[in-house]
Amino acid sequence: MDRALVDVVRRFNRTVTQRVGALDDSYLARDRPLAQSRLLWEIGLDGAEVAALRTRLDLDAGYLSRLLRTLEGAGLVVVGSGESDGRVRTARLTEAGRAEWALLDGRSDDLAWAVLAPLTDGQRSRLTAAMAEVEHLLMASLVDIGPCHPGEPRARACLRAYARELAARFDSGFDPAGSGVDDHELVPPAGLFLVATVATEAVGCGAVRLLPGEPAEIKRLWVSPSVRGLGVGRRLLNELERHAAAAGARSVRLDTNRTLTEAMRLYRAEGYQEIPRYNDNPYAHHWFAKPLN
């Protein structure tokens, strides 16, 4: 990797951490560091499940527990059982915590304005546009893709979301049992199932079947709306193609429904060409193939 690029990222990190006060023991002039204030903010006025906070902030369970105990000791948070499920631990703000949250909200606005105030209107527009682009790209860099058994909870969560979306979008609904692929076909050596995650939250999936003497087949490619536009679908597709090529496949193919126009745009952009029907999938209207190097 180009050393100059690494140096730019490091300079940016140093500037941002200093400008937003991340180095201060008393963030936003309150008697607590940034980590505690951020956790208080994420709990929010409606409260939040502890497991969800850990996932959202990508925190070690022990560190999160220590932060929560500190906020509890300050009388700002209470942690107890969830209302609908006693096994779920939930953090809620006390009355003092809600007041502190409102104060942090106002001071966060003040800090943002302090960044913008010295700039001209043109500079403000440039800065906020650049910030939006940086946020977009940083989110893309947080996405991790790796193999996962299709029976594991992360994979099942993706497949349920995939089925729900297709059922809502397809003219005739969608039944996964009718799509012609079983879990055992998506594990080595028969195939591979990939899951994309942000922190520990599954946000996408894809699979490839390796068929002896035939082209490999892409299946179950899905990306959560929360990360669409970040190139996750392309990364999943490319990684599945790479695995198929490494396994000896000379080409790869797939089918799709006519309502999935964005998927067809991706396939065409990645070099897939439309071909005649090659299977009897009742949900398919278009079939594509691509040679592998």
Image (cartoon, grey):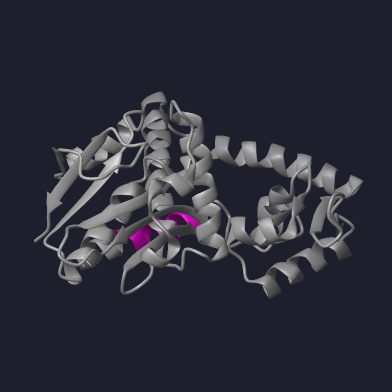
Q: Residue 59: x, y in percent?
A: 61, 66
Q: Residue 147: x, y in percent?
A: 40, 68
Residue displayed at 78% across by 41% down: 45
Residue sitting nearer the eye, 250 or 136: 250
Is the residue 176 above or below the residue 240 in the image?
Answer: above
Q: Residue 181: x, y in percent?
A: 39, 55
Q: Could you tell me how many numbered marks the image carries? A: 0
User: Does residue 221 show up magenta in the picture?
Assistant: no
Per the picture, the main secondary structure of the magenta-coloured stretch is helix
Residue displayed at 25% across by 45% down: 279
Residue displayed at 36% across by 37% down: 282
Q: Quarter of the image holding residue 63?
A: bottom right
Residue sitting nearer the eye, 114 or 180: 180
Q: Is residue 27 left or right of residue 221?
A: right
Decide if residue 199 is in sight here. no
Q: Which residues are magenta?
A: 8-17
Is the residue 117 above or below the residue 200 in the image?
Answer: above
Q: Is residue 280 left or right of residue 28?
A: left
The quadrant of the image that shows the C terminus is bottom left
Decide if residue 61 is in sight here. yes
Q: Is residue 292 left or right of residue 236?
A: left
Q: Residue 274: x, y in percent?
A: 15, 37
User: Does residue 13 show up magenta in the picture?
Assistant: yes
Is the residue 138 above or below the residue 258 in the image?
Answer: below
Q: Quarter of the image holding residue 235?
A: bottom left
Residue sitting nearer the eye, 220 or 178: 178
Q: Is residue 59 left or right of residue 192?
A: right
Residue sitting nearer the eye, 256 or 155: 256
Residue displayed at 88% across by 65% down: 73
The quadrant of the image that shows the N terminus is bottom left
